[in-house]
Amino acid sequence: MNEMIAGRNPVREALRAGRPINKVVMAKGAGTGPLAEIVKLAKQNNIPLQMVERSHLDKMNPGVPHQGVIAYAAAKQYVELEELLEIARAKGQDPFIIMLDEINDPHNLGAIMRTADAAGAHGVIIPQRRSVALTSTVAKASAGAVEYVPVARVTNLDQTIRQLKDEGLWVVGADMDGSEIYWDAKLTGPLLLVIGGEGKGLGRLIKERCDMLVRLPMAGRVGSLNASVAAALLVYEVVRQRR
């Protein structure tokens, strides 16, 4: 799957057609004239726009004329946050949504989506910035789950958590300093499960916004588990408690 779209007309038409785009990369100083519409369309659709040196664009797609702009297409269309809640309502179930705080490894995101599909979660939320998007590598790592797990890509995780709290969801974050071991925590009812990024865990503001922080017991010398492994354990504890 070729994720890269190069050139003014191809990028502009992809944006006009509503094709899911992860990011637009443009040469510095090129956002006027013929490329002004691309800038406008990217902003209208809340698509990240990155300005780089023209030489950087030359290296990104050698031998292909980019005319100052390249776009990265998503492997699948993103959904709106409200759609995740609607999916749960349509099934007559309490919402169960997984939020990922800056997961940067595409294999981790793919593995988490595979777990989400197997466990029957209603969707995944990722941030627009400082996080891997729905790339072809993620799609491959998900073993097909990308086709079945809805993903909402939001601009602000803190704001999204507050919105979901207003919808009645209980927010549980995974943290090594959590007050409860995960199997002792109450994980039933409408739930948002928040998993932190590789190495750094949950951000300070996100921790503060959680209703509860839970931890996985670690008896060995390694300080933490891989993000997708931790997510799988927590997700299936939710499944167990909901039986």
Image (tube, helix red, strand yellow):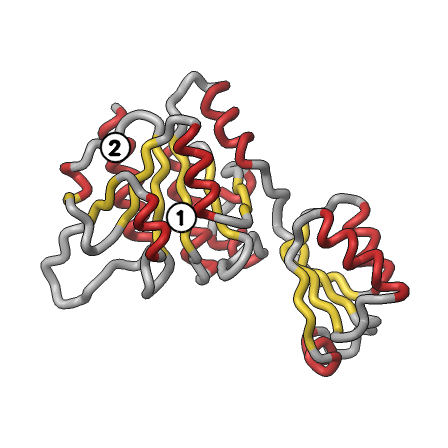
Q: Position of residue 57 (x, y in %)?
A: 72, 76
Disc 2 and disc 1 in contact, CB within 8 angstroms: no
**Residue 130 screen position, x and y as percent:** 50, 61
Question: The N terminus appears in which quarter of the rendering?
Answer: bottom right
Q: Is residue 133 above or below residue 79?
A: below
The residue at 71%/53% (across/down) is 43
- Judged left or right of residue 232, residue 9 is right
Q: What element carries label 1?
A: helix
Residue with the most extreme right position: 33
Which residue position is annotated with label 1?
112
- Dot 2 or dot 1: first in sequence order is 1
Q: Position of residue 12 (x, y in %)?
A: 82, 55
Nearer the observer, 239 or 181: 181
Q: Residue furthest left?
A: 219
At a point 46% along the width and 47% down the height, the residue shown is 157
Q: Quadrant of residue 165?
A: top left
- In the image, is 119 to the left or to the right of 144? left
Can you say which quadrant of the picture contains the C terminus? top left
Give 151 or 51, whichever is nearer the viewer: 51
Name the kind of residue labelled 1 in the image. Answer: Ile
Q: Which residue is drawn at 57% across and 56% down?
A: 135
Task: Identify the mark at residue 187; answer none if there is no mark.
Answer: 2
Q: Is residue 106 above or below residue 210?
A: below
Question: Camera-side residue: 209 or 78?
Answer: 209
